[in-house]
Amino acid sequence: MNKAALGENYFQRANVRFALGKYEKAIADYDEALRLEPQYAKAYNNRGLAKQHLERYEGAIADYDKAIQLNPQFARAYNNRGDAKEHIREDTEERLERYEDAIADYDKAIQLDSQEAAAYLNRGHAKANLEQREDARADLQHALELATEQGDAELVQLAQELLSNLPYRHLKEVKRSEE
């Protein structure tokens, strides 16, 4: 078996472990996939998600940065990096900067993929936290429309809940892995 195929096997096993909530084991498999295929942007993205689930936000951002460096058109990596940026300074005074940085990443994700419903939802969250309620409502409504069209029941439910609860202080952001 060649290195690329072996790297793909580790990537797929990591995805299964991630789905089972075994984030440390998933990270180990993503590490191995990246050792074999160091240019594998999806593996960096997904390893970032696993790190983010373990609240290792700096490491997650570094992985998203690498995924974006390898593939500047990777909309989900921008979305996920924006989400990590919102959390990295969760308990500090840098709230405004945190949300503005995240919005810039969500903007880029939407620019690259206007069908990325999670990016609209997350941007709506950040705008709501900046008290930009009308813009937040527009993003959340658009996320709801896209999620409905795409048959994403989880995102539909979340968008409906958020719209009904505006204004709000915090919500669950949506992160997306690459299969």
Image (cartoon, helix red, strand yellow):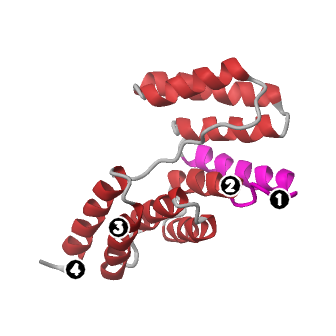
Identified at 61% across, 22% down, the residue is 161
Tell me, yes or no, if residue 58 can be seen here. Answer: yes
**Could you give the CA–CA distance between mark 2 and mark 3, rounded to whole angstroms?**
23 Å
Disc with the residue nearer the chain's start (4 vs 2): 4
Q: Earlier in the sequence, mark 1 or mark 2?
A: 2
Q: Amino acid at mark 2?
A: His
Marks 1 and 2 sit apart, C-alpha to C-alpha, by: 10 Å
C-alpha separation, residue under disc 3 versus residue under disc 4? 20 Å
- Is 149 inside the magenta-drawn segment? no
Q: Name the one closer to the observer, 93 or 149.
A: 93
Q: Residues within 10 Å of mark 3 (few under 14, many from 20)?
A: some
Compare marks 3 and 4 and give the one earlier in the sequence: 4
Residue 90: x %, y % from top left? 74, 54
Inspect the image, locate mark 1, and give the three-letter code of the amino acid beneath it: Thr
In this view, 78 is above or below 65: above
Image coords of residue 13 (percent x, y): 25, 62
> On the picture, is 70 further left or further right than 88?
left
- State whether residue 114 appears in this view: no
Q: Mark 3 falls on what kind of element?
A: helix
Question: Which amino acid lies under the numbered mark 3 shown in the image of this protein?
Answer: Lys
Residue underneath mark 2: 87
Q: Secondary structure at mark 4?
A: helix
Outermost left residue: 1
Residue 3: give its label: 4
Is residue 135 rendered to the left or right of residue 74? right
Examine the rendered structure and indicate whether residue 115 appears above or below residue 93. above
Q: Which residue is mark 3?
A: 25
Q: What element does badge 2 sit on? A: helix
Q: Which residues are magenta?
A: 88-112
Circle nearer the N terminus (2, 3) = 3
Residue under pointer 1: 92
